[in-house]
Amino acid sequence: MKKSANGREPLYVVRSSRIHGRGVFADRRIRKGTRIVEYKGERVGNDEADSRYDEDNMKRHHTFLFTLDSRTVVDGAIKRGGGDASYINHSCEPNCEAVISDRRIFIHALRTIQPGEELAYDYQYERTGKNDKELEKFYLCRCGSESCRGSIMKPARKRKRPAKLR
Ligand SMILES: [Zn+2]
């Protein structure tokens, strides 16, 4: 088990999730504002990222890309140097948020999180404005929260590419 971002005892465990695949769960009480874990991975350009994941042939997204800025994408696949943060699922009612600091991505607690709660942040995939109807099916959300918007894409807005593909 890895140490937490602050170098102390791990705050979480990775195990199977009802939302999707594996998830990350609080192993102790995590205070609001805590930097929980870094989203690690290989830094690549947009073209390289696109070439790694053939979305046209996927039924549902399952890539590990996180857009850091307009030129750089972090590929958090485990074979690309990804870590535990790559397993954190999306929720439309998240208890965490992704914070970019010095060109690194960290997952912070949005509120106090109790032991056993699954950690989640809002992926907010960017919309392309083109095939949003189809993409909404592709980026289907099953987070189960009351305010679930049914999609892990951002609420209608127009920008370039998903903020995070997973
Ligand atoms: Zn949802």
Image (tube, grey):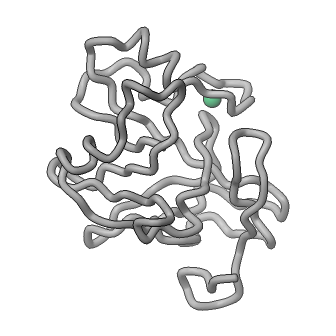
In percent of the image, x 18 and y 54: which residue is there? Answer: 45
Please identify the quarter of the rendering in which residue 162 is found: top left
Q: Quadrant of ligand 1?
A: top right
In percent of the image, x 71 and y 69: which residue is there? Answer: 30
Q: Is residue 100 above or below residue 10?
A: above
Q: Nearer the viewer, residue 82 or 146?
A: 82
Q: Nearer the viewer, residue 34 or 43?
A: 43
Horizontal side of 158 relative to 47 (left or right) equals right
Which residue extends farthest right? Answer: 116
Question: Residue 77, position in %: x, y?
Answer: 46, 59
Q: Quadrant of the N terminus?
A: bottom right
Horizontal side of 87 relative to 77 (left or right) equals right
Q: Is residue 75 above or below residue 89?
A: below
Which residue extends farthest top? Answer: 133
In percent of the image, x 77 and y 48: which residue is there? Answer: 17
Question: Residue 118, position in %: x, y?
Answer: 74, 53
Which residue extends farthest bottom? Answer: 7
